[in-house]
Amino acid sequence: MAVQLYVGNLSYSTTDESLRSLFAEFGEVASAKVIMDRDTGRSKGFGFVEMADQSSADSAIRGLDGKDVGGRNIKVNIAKPKK
């Protein structure tokens, strides 16, 4: 079962593809999306990555939470469900 991860404090230059490749070393990435501001077209500094299974998601959290990526210490955790 796929697991949705929240990724915060991303560099504004992070793209969907660079986010996907960052997480790919921890397992199969089903999707990776950097959230963009509708008005400016710039990154909002966070995104979501869907890992194929729980063990890949756990590995990604352990390996990337607090890691310096693009000059910023990113935050990685399980995404909270939409309300």
Image (spheres, rainbow, N blue to C red):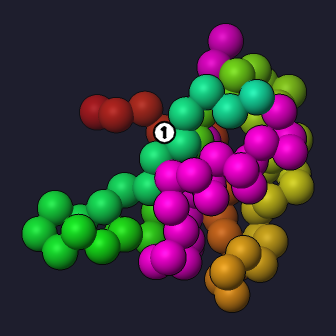
Please state which of residues 67 and 19 is positioned toward the viewer in this rendering: 19
Magenta-drawn segment? 1-27
On the rendered structure, is 30 left or right of 42?
Answer: right
Q: Amino acid at mark 1?
A: Lys
| Residue lying furthest left | 39
User: Where is mark 1, residue-wise?
Assistant: 80
Query: Can residue 47 be seen by looking at this rendering?
Result: no
Task: Kindly state the secondary structure of the residue where label 1 is placed.
Answer: loop
- Sort mark 1 into few (<14), some (14-19) or many (20+) by Cα contacts within 10 Å: few
Residue 1 in the image: above or below residue 23 = above
| Image quadrant in which the N terminus is located | top right
Percent across and percent down for residue 64 are 80, 59
On the rendered structure, is 39 left or right of 11?
Answer: left
Percent across and percent down for residue 27 are 83, 33
Residue 55 in the image: above or below residue 73 = above
**Magenta segment includes 70:** no
Please state which of residues 25 and 3 is positioned toward the viewer in this rendering: 25
Percent across and percent down for residue 71 are 69, 87
| Image quadrant in which the C terminus is located | top left
Quarter of the view holding residue 45: bottom left
**Magenta segment includes 23:** yes
Please state which of residues 1 and 18 is positioned toward the viewer in this rendering: 18
Query: Can residue 17 be seen by looking at this rendering?
Result: yes
Residue that appears at 62% across and 58% down: 18
Residue 74 in the image: above or below residue 61 = below
Percent across and percent down for residue 79 are 53, 41
Residue that appears at 75% across and 21% down: 53
| Residue lying furthest front | 17
Residue that appears at 46% across and 77% down: 12
